[in-house]
Amino acid sequence: MTRSLTILGATGSIGRSTADVVLAHRDEFRVEAVVGGRNALALAEVARRLGARFAALADEGGAATLQQALSGTGIESGAGQSAVLEAVEREADIILAAISGTAGLVPTYAALKPGRRIALANKESLVCAGDAFMTDARRLNVEIMPVDSEHNALEHALAAGLNRDVEKAVITASGGPFRTWSRQRISSASAKEASAHPVWSMGSKINIDSATLMNKGLELIEAHHLFGLGAERLDVLVHPEAIVHGLVQWTDGAVTAGLALPDMKVPIANALRGDRRLRMELPRLDLAAIGRLSFERPDDDRFPCLALAKAALRAGGAIPTVLNAANEIAVEAYMAGSIGFYDIPETVERVCSTFSGRQISTPATVAEALAIDREARQTACRLIPAPVEAVQVR
């Protein structure tokens, strides 16, 4: 049976990998809509490749370019927030949610419709508004399928038993580009060096989150909401080979792990599957050829962002929302050259400290989460030694 699919974030790395999966199974999917950010020509190209019925660009200024690029194809188009939400509202069985950052929160939340499946690659939906998002997903009978390789691996591993018998669920980190660097050397690292991820091909912001290990901290918060596990039962291991993506330690001492070569098409195919797995013509994992898998504990001294995220998860309330907002502003400032690498965790810690004493309750709605996000961004901007316009406040 053919299933309809809408791709949010179609021009990013996850969106491009999703297109490859769909094109390998053209008889199983019909693409209803594709959504992009600012690159009208790239969005038009993916819309044509996939035979989408509608293309929406978040940037209103690209409307004419998008329309012209799709002229004669029969593909409808629109631009601006209303067009993005129109794409979400169109009939689709599956929504692949891969818009990066807090910008993806509103359209991903709007995608929650009865009986739908959300293939979730936007972790901020759960970091910023996890309680509201998961409560409504359960109320509407929406199936949430994680696309991140780590959560996809945990989903497989957790299927081996019951949550009550989980002693520890562990996600892995490659360690990023600075895994073997000294703190002194890291302190002077440029944004270009931080963006050079040794394993995955991702956007600049996510690459830098990987360099600071904040990405793993956000993934712990995401895992908490996806799987209902408390902070005390979640952890991170550094695993440079990026073969073991997640593992579960059970109360009887057994361990179940999810392994795969580091290719995002594997978890995407799993998230899009129907009543059977999609066959993908990808290289197969050959453990004998790899020979050795290594693991090490994260170094909180060199990578304090992970410890900050763990503390935010333990604190709960609005602190995870604040953490994410402050981090997005700090990373933008770092990419702009306004601050250094270790100014990122320092900024995040100062902003979280500002909010922690106020005991703001957990956001019950997306609107509440966005209000907290906005205030946290403004607080972070005041701490950045650069013009506010250099670090956009949404």
Image (tube, rainbow, N blue to C red):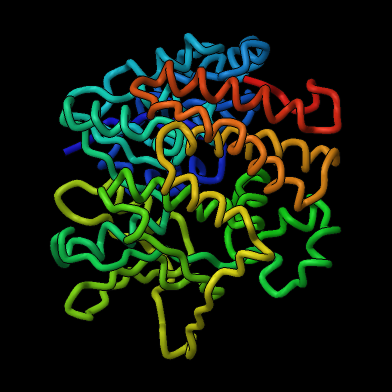
Residue situated in front as seen by the camera: 329 or 315: 315
Residue situated in front as seen by the camera: 315 or 148: 315
Residue 215 relative to residue 98: left or right = right
Identify the residue shown where x is 41% and y is 85%.
287
Location of the N terminus by quadrant is top left
Q: Position of residue 230 (x, y in %)?
A: 31, 52
Residue 201 visible, this orientation:
no
Residue 335 visible, this orientation:
yes
Location of the C terminus by quadrant is top right
Residue 358 relative to residue 1: left or right = right
Identify the residue shown where x is 60% and y is 50%.
202
Above/below status of 137 relative to 91 = below
Residue 135 relative to residue 41: left or right = left
Q: Position of residue 286 (x, y in %)?
A: 41, 82
Above/below status of 131 relative to 348 = above
Residue situated in front as seen by the camera: 110 or 313: 313
Residue 177 relative to residue 185: left or right = left
Total numbered labels placed on residues in the image: 0
The image quarter containing residue 375 is top right
Q: Position of residue 217 (x, y in %)?
A: 50, 52
Identify the residue shown where x is 30% and y is 46%.
226
The image quarter containing residue 307 is bottom right
Residue situated in front as seen by the camera: 265 or 370: 370
Q: Position of residue 227 (x, y in %)?
A: 26, 50
Identify the residue shown where x is 17% and y is 78%.
252
